[in-house]
Amino acid sequence: MSAEKYANLWLRVPPLGEQRGIVSFLDRETARIDALIAKVNEAIERLKEYRTALLSSAVTGKIDVREEVSH
């Protein structure tokens, strides 16, 4: 289709009030998703810090990581 044919297309759009409702819904949902993403990223950072501390404790001998063999 050429640009001229696009210019002559009729498009049905929802009434302005409905468009605003859709925009409000999408704004709320994307904000909710962004907040969840931020929480997940914070959890990942805490886990990385925990991993680093755990490795440091294991390397310096502060914790014993040897497996015990039962007879």
Image (cartoon, grey):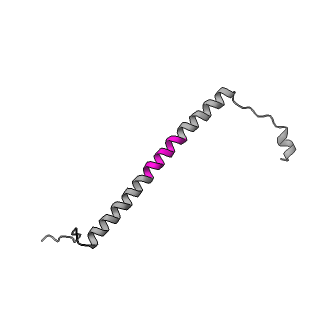
Q: Tell me where residue 59 appears, x and y as whole percent.
A: 28, 73
Q: Tell me where residue 66 appears, x and y as whole percent.
A: 22, 72
Region of the chain picked out in magenta, as a range: 30-40
Pick whichever, 10 or 19, lies toward us: 19
Q: Is residue 56 left or right of residue 11?
A: left
Q: Residue at x 31, y 68 (%)?
A: 55
Q: Quadrant of the C terminus?
A: bottom left
Q: Tell me where residue 19 appears, x and y as whole percent.
A: 66, 31
Examine the rendered structure and indicate whether residue 13 appears above or below residue 45. Answer: above
Examine the rendered structure and indicate whether residue 49 appears above or below residue 20. Answer: below
Q: Residue at x 14, y 70 (%)?
A: 70
Q: Residue at x 76, y 34 (%)?
A: 11
Pick whichever, 60 or 17, lies toward us: 60
Q: Residue at x 85, y 46 (%)?
A: 3
Examine the rendered structure and indicate whether residue 12 appears above or below residue 4. Answer: above
Let me know if residue 38 is in the magenta part: yes
Q: Main secondary structure of the magenta part?
A: helix
